[in-house]
Amino acid sequence: MNSVDTKSLSSADEKPAFLDRLFKLKAHNTTVKTELVAGFTTFITMCYVVFVIPGMLSDAGMDKGALFAATCLVAGLSSIAIGLYANWPVGLAPGMGLNAFFAYAVVLGMGYSWEQAMGAVFWGGIGFMLLSLFKVREWIIDSIPKGLRVGITAGIGLFLALIGLKNAGIVVASPGTIITLGDITQFSPVMACLSLLLILGLAYRGFKAAVLLAIVVVSGIGLLAGDISFQGIYSAPPSLEPVVGKLDIMGALKPEMLGVIVAFMFVNLFDTTGTLIAVGDKAGLADQNGKMHNMNRAMITDGTASWAGALVGTPTVTSYVESASGVAAGGRTGLVAVTVGGLFLLCMFLSPLAAMVPAYATAGALIYVAVLMAGSLANIDWNDLTEAGPVLITAIMMPLSFSIANGIALGFIAYPLVKLLAGRASEVSISVWVLAALFILKFIFFGI
């Protein structure tokens, strides 16, 4: 009896000891239990992506069931990878804004096939990984003005808002006014509004699973109203065959797709850097000089996940700011990310639930993310017209041209020219002038 007890205790001690060595739990002043709870918290706040993203990408002609499985698989493996390689408490998954750009701008807007668009994601991921691997990323981030970065973030938010409103039927096409208010007394717009109101109210109160709960509640109302039908809960994961390996790598190398590749690469660069800095600060991962521990490893993981995800069938993978919820719950190490990844992999067996979620249930989530992203505009000095003008051009032209790439291009062109005319050309870095010239040439020779 005593020998059994001793053996059991020894086995129990070895497990935490192994995890402590792997994730340096004591050095980060945390425990296995705290990390697991934090991982579950992060997962609950970001698992809505497995419902929202397949819905968006299916509009581009991709198989929804395969997309659900691919999203779960890529989010699971990439989160585990960043936890093991970089020891960061961050969840990774295909990005909301970049998925919207993929489906509604590149495929439906520009007319490229989803296979070509996925090829552009692949090359954008390769570029992002190389920038991180050779540490060019720091130079680019430092040389590109804060205003343009803010404009890109806010513009993607506005673009997401337009998509969410359109999917819900709250705004519709109009020959006379381009867009107009839809019939908001119909079931779909009412449910989308309810979804958004629930998210905003619960998030303000600090409820960490606000987005997920709103999707569940609105989907439940749709089920009771007979608008959707119950399809079960568990099943074997859908086949990945319709999407895996279908990307057109060579077709994405057409000169006219350069802007698309650059957009995937740079938007992910800014988004990931901002998220990692924000989460890393809250997790206490910065040293006395403000340098983030293993930041480059985290960036390399993100970039690798993007091009590898394209092979599986998902657009650009990015770090999720929802990871801050896990950090707030005490998470400090990669064990958080590994927990998040494991839970995403388990989600692959819940595909019937994902198939039941209607577009109006996820529309609120899109608009909520738009609110968070557009909030970055508060950091702009609106009294400085040489900053405010290009920022607004960048942000507003994304939804109005229905293209994130065009918004980025026009912002990069406007910024140095406005500074030049204002007599402040010395404030513009060489990299911005180079990018502006490339975007001008792109419009001249390849159009939009």
Image (cartoon, helix red, strand yellow):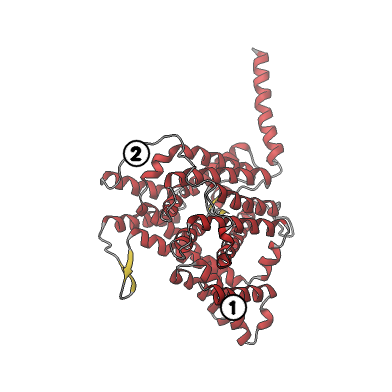
Q: Which residue occupies the foreground of this view, 268 or 46?
A: 268
Amino acid residing under circle 1: Tyr
**Residue 225 visible in rendering:** yes
For the residue labelled by badge 2, is the local secondary structure a helix, a strand or a loop?
loop
**Residue 378 visible in rendering:** no
Q: Label for residue 36?
A: none
For the residue labelled by badge 1, is the local secondary structure a helix, a strand or a loop?
helix
Check disc 2 and report the residue beneath it: 231
Residue 250: percent from the left, percent from the top? Answer: 59, 57
Figure check: 8 above or below 125? above
Residue 360 sits in quarter:
bottom left
Residue 259 sits in quarter:
bottom right
Q: Label for residue 415?
A: 1
Residue 156: percent from the left, percent from the top? Answer: 50, 64
Q: Residues within 10 Å of mark 1 (few under 14, many from 20)?
A: many
Q: Which residue occupies the foreground of this view, 149 or 231?
A: 231
Q: Residues within 10 Å of mark 2 (few under 14, many from 20)?
A: few
First in sequence, mark 1 or 2: give its number. Answer: 2
Figure check: 82 above or below 161? above
Query: Who's the residue at 58% across and 81% down the image?
Result: 386
Query: Who's the residue at 59% across and 46% down the image?
Result: 78
Mark 1 and mark 2: Cα distance apart in space: 52 Å
Residue 210: percent from the left, percent from the top? Answer: 43, 50
Query: Who's the residue at 61% across and 57% down the image?
Result: 123
Are the residues tagged 1 and 2 within 8 Å (C-beta)?
no
Amino acid residing under circle 2: Gln
Residue 327: percent from the left, percent from the top? Answer: 58, 49
